[in-house]
Image (tube, helix red, strand yellow):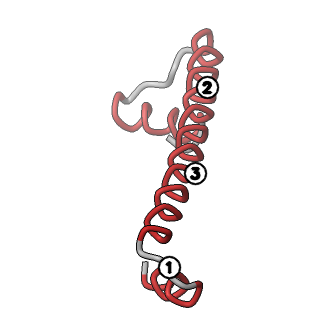
Amino acid sequence: MPDFAAFRAEVKKVFKADIPLADRSDWEDWINRDRAEIARLTAEIAQAEAQIDSIVYDLFDLTEDEIALLESAV
C-alpha cells in the first residue's frame, strides 16, 4: 500500500464502508511503520546484492569495462 489514503480508498471499494474515525490513526500508524520496515529491508537487500556482485566480479577477475558491460545489460 503506498499510503493511508490509498489503503482507505481500497477498503471503501472492497467493503463498501469507510474505516471508523476512531480507528484511522491506528491504521495509519501501522501502515507507516510497515512502509519504514519495507524501505529498510529493501536497502539491506540492495547492499547485499552489491556485495555479491563485487565478490563475483573479483572471482572472475573482470575489468571495469566488462563490469560496465554486464551492468548495462541487466
The location of residue 50, given as percent across then percent down, is: 54, 59
The location of residue 65, given as percent across then percent down, is: 56, 90
Q: Earlier in the sequence, mark 2 or mark 1?
A: 2
Q: Secondary structure at mark 1?
A: helix
Q: Amino acid at mark 2?
A: Arg
Residue that appears at 39% across and 38% down: 13
Q: Amino acid at mark 3?
A: Gln
Mark 3 to mark 2 CA distance (whole Å): 21 Å
The location of residue 51, given as percent across then percent down, is: 54, 55
Mark whose residue sits in front, 3 or 2: 3
Mark 3 to mark 1 CA distance (whole Å): 15 Å
Q: Name the residue at the left extreme.
A: 14
Binning the other alpha carbons within 10 Å of mark 1 as few (below 14), some (14 to 19) or many (20 upward) gives few
Q: Looking at the picture, tell me which residue is in the foreground, 55 or 6.
A: 55
Q: Secondary structure at mark 2?
A: helix
Residue that appears at 52% across and 32% down: 8
Determine which of the numbered discs, if any, sits on residue 71 in the image.
Answer: 1
